Amino acid sequence: MFRARSSGPIGRPGCQTGRVETPWSVAPPDALGEALHHLRLAGTFYCRSELTAPWGLTVPPLPGHLWLHVVTAGGCRLETDGADPVQLRAGDVALVPHGAGHRLRSAPGTIAPSVMDLPQTFANDRYSLLRHGSGGEPTTLVCAAVQVDTPGARDLVELLPPLLHVGASPRTEWMQATLRLVATEAEELRPGGEAVLTRLADVLVIQVVRSWLETDPAARTGWLGALADPRIGRAITLIHREPARAWTVASLAAEIPMSRSAFAARFTALVGEPALAYVTRRRMHLALDRLRAGDAGVAEVAGALGYRSEAAFSRAFTRVIGTTPGAARRAGALTPR
């Protein structure tokens, strides 16, 4: 049902020196903007739900996915572990970012069978219509299960709270136009409708995350706080732009500019790991995505990420990822796309 797309950190022995242009070299000018820029989604599955009270639905856990719920008419209660229940109304958007199971109900305590056990009409393998309930007050939902498609985006998603909720208000009128497009496309899946819905999901998820970044103080701690820091955020942006460049602590500090010791201490304090550990981990996650895609061999990926030696690359990859590059590539070849 879900198909993942694959997409296309430094200064270690075995890496080339100097700037190396790679397919991952293009990035927007700021670190937070880059994180949102790379928030690409894949494997989208949509369900339009026409529900009448009393009704309830249980959405089972789906690791590696985000669930997006848009209320286009009526309202419901959303319950998920680790967060307080929220009441959703028409025009509201909710994001369950970690693939956790959750429940949607017309009212507290309503029986909520698994959506997997309810009859659905499938227009294709990516879109279904679900009708459920007991004939009372109607509610219409558009729900999407999506996968995050880039390493930078996964770093961001890991930091999101268990539930993000953006309610309809004059302040969020900028989101309502997107919601109206979602409702229109979901009512009747016209030619090209799947592509439109996928792009709209990208936009909605970014809008929800951006709203959280702007309004929640918790969004400015840890790695996200580091992105917002003018100096360390710039260093992270440079690493993301040029993952194959032979970075050292000294060369990163010179770009900021900061003293080497002050930069090293501030980077570790804000990000939670030393700069060179971060850039190596970033490179290996890029390599993992490329190997899983199966469009390049180990030597090619190693070279694209600045390694002169395939052996040096393999050692770094195995240390960070926990498996060999060859095994990762073979596992990707066995994954349906």
Image (spheres, grey):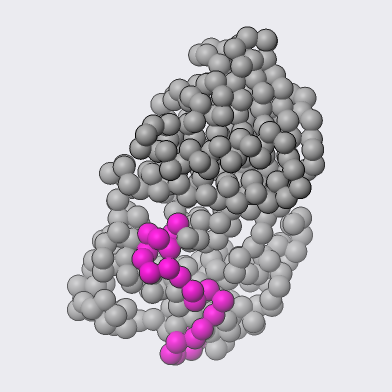
Task: Identify the residue shown where x is 49% and y is 86%.
Answer: 20
Q: Nearer the viewer, residue 114 or 190?
A: 190
For the N terminus, the quadrant is top right
- Magenta residues? 14-36
Residue 160 appears in the figure = no
Task: Identify the residue shown where x is 32% and y is 47%.
Answer: 214
**Does residue 92 show up magenta in the picture?**
no
Answer with the quarter of the image where residue 168 lies.
top left
Instruction: Estimate the x, y position of residue 80 in percent, counting from the top left.
Output: 50, 29
Answer with the quarter of the image where residue 292 lies.
bottom right
Q: Is residue 226 above or below residue 1?
A: below
How many numbered circles does the render carry? Answer: 0
**Does residue 23 show up magenta in the picture?**
yes
Q: Main secondary structure of the magenta part?
A: loop
Residue 203 appears in the figure = yes
For the C terminus, the quadrant is bottom right
Instruction: Estimate the x, y position of residue 136 in percent, counting from the top left.
Output: 63, 9
Instruction: Estimate the x, y position of residue 13 in percent, counting from the top left.
Output: 45, 85
Instruction: Estimate the x, y position of residue 329 in percent, counting from the top left.
Output: 69, 68
Task: Identify the residue shown where x is 76% and y is 47%.
Answer: 191
